[in-house]
């Protein structure tokens, strides 16, 4: 799919699951469980061993049922490898202009991480589709709302500190979508192969987004 179509699907879903684990062995099933619960955008981080193999296997198993991305993309070499493996979007904790340019070149969505207003605007002006506000637990929803005041045109995705207790507040503060890691893809559940737990958590996050948008 094109960058625009994938971006639309991500924004409509409202949740980007950050899939991070000590082993890539069961992560395809994790992504399947997320999708079964209603979270259809997931990023496989490059902190996962053999992350490229996980991306390839997930793409082969799930096709277009999930908008599959790569996370912790720190340089253009990693970005290109992720795209060739099947990633439809790139996420990073930092701003790397070469990664943004490469994503644009290959018509892939890109979500660089930034924190200060200067970094956020620089990422947006460089071509980011969404700016990942990281770490969002520092400042929380009030910080996001404050940044949205002078920069209403910038799509912001808080990541870090987003959980079932704070998700609604981040949405009310103006988040276009939410990056959710360990509070959704729980390390204990992954280690135990408790995919039902991950599916149930996904359904709870999806319900929060749905309820917020029904009243917004």
Image (cartoon, helix red, strand yellow):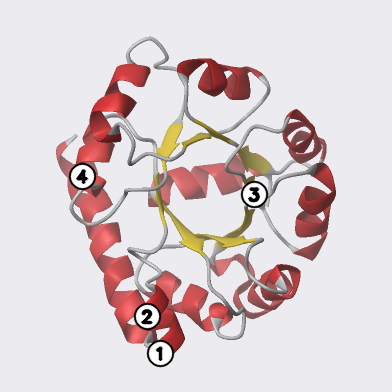
Task: Give above or below for 192 relative to 132.
Answer: below
**Residue in view at x 70 percent, y 77 percent:** 60
Could one spot residue 11 in this view of the protein? yes
Q: Could you tell which of marks 2 and 4 lies nearer the N-terminus?
A: 4
Q: Could you tell which of marks 2 and 3 lies nearer the N-terminus?
A: 3
**Which residue, given by chain and number where applicable, does mark 4 sit on?**
168
Q: Nearest to the eye among marks 2 and 3: give it.
A: 2
**Which residue, given by chain and number where applicable, does mark 3 sit on?**
89
Badge number at residue 188? 2
Q: Secondary structure at mark 2?
A: helix
Q: Which corner quadrant of the image does residue 61 belong to?
A: bottom right
Q: Secondary structure at mark 1?
A: helix
Task: Give above or below for 183 relative to 6.
Answer: below
Q: Could you tell which of marks 1 and 4 lies nearer the N-terminus?
A: 4
Q: State the CA–CA distance, disc 2 to disc 3.
A: 27 Å
Label 1 crowding class (10 Å Cα cut-off): few <14, some 14-19, many 20+?
A: few
**Residue in view at x 67 percent, y 53 percent:** 88
Could one spot residue 193 in this view of the protein? no
Q: State the CA–CA distance, disc 2 to disc 4.
A: 24 Å
């Amino acid at each position: 799919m094109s960058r625009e179509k994938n971006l639309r699907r991500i924004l409509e879903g409202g949740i980007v699951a950050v899939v991070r684990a000590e082993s890539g062995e069961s992560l395809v099933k994790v992504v399947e469980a997320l999708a079964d619960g209603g979270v259809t955008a997931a990023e496989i981080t490059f902190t996962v061993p053999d992350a490229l193999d996980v991306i390839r296997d997930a793409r082969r198993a799930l096709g277009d049922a999930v908008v599959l991305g790569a996370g912790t993309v720190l340089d253009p070499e990693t970005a290109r490898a992720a795209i060739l493996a099947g990633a439809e979007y790139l996420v990073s904790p930092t701003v790397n202009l070469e990664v943004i340019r490469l994503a644009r070149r290959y018509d892939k969505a890109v979500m660089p991480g930034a924190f200060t207003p200067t970094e956020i605007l620089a990422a947006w002006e460089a071509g980011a589709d969404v700016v990942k506000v990281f770490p969002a637990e520092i400042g929380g929803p009030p910080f996001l709302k404050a940044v949205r005041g002078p920069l209403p045109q910038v799509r912001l995705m808080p990541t870090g500190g987003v959980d079932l207790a704070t998700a609604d507040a981040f949405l009310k503060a103006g988040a276009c979508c939410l990056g959710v890691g360990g509070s959704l893809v729980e390390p204990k559940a992954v280690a135990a192969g408790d995919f039902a737990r991950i599916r149930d958590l996904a359904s709870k996050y999806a319900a929060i987004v749905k309820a917020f948008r029904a009243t917004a």
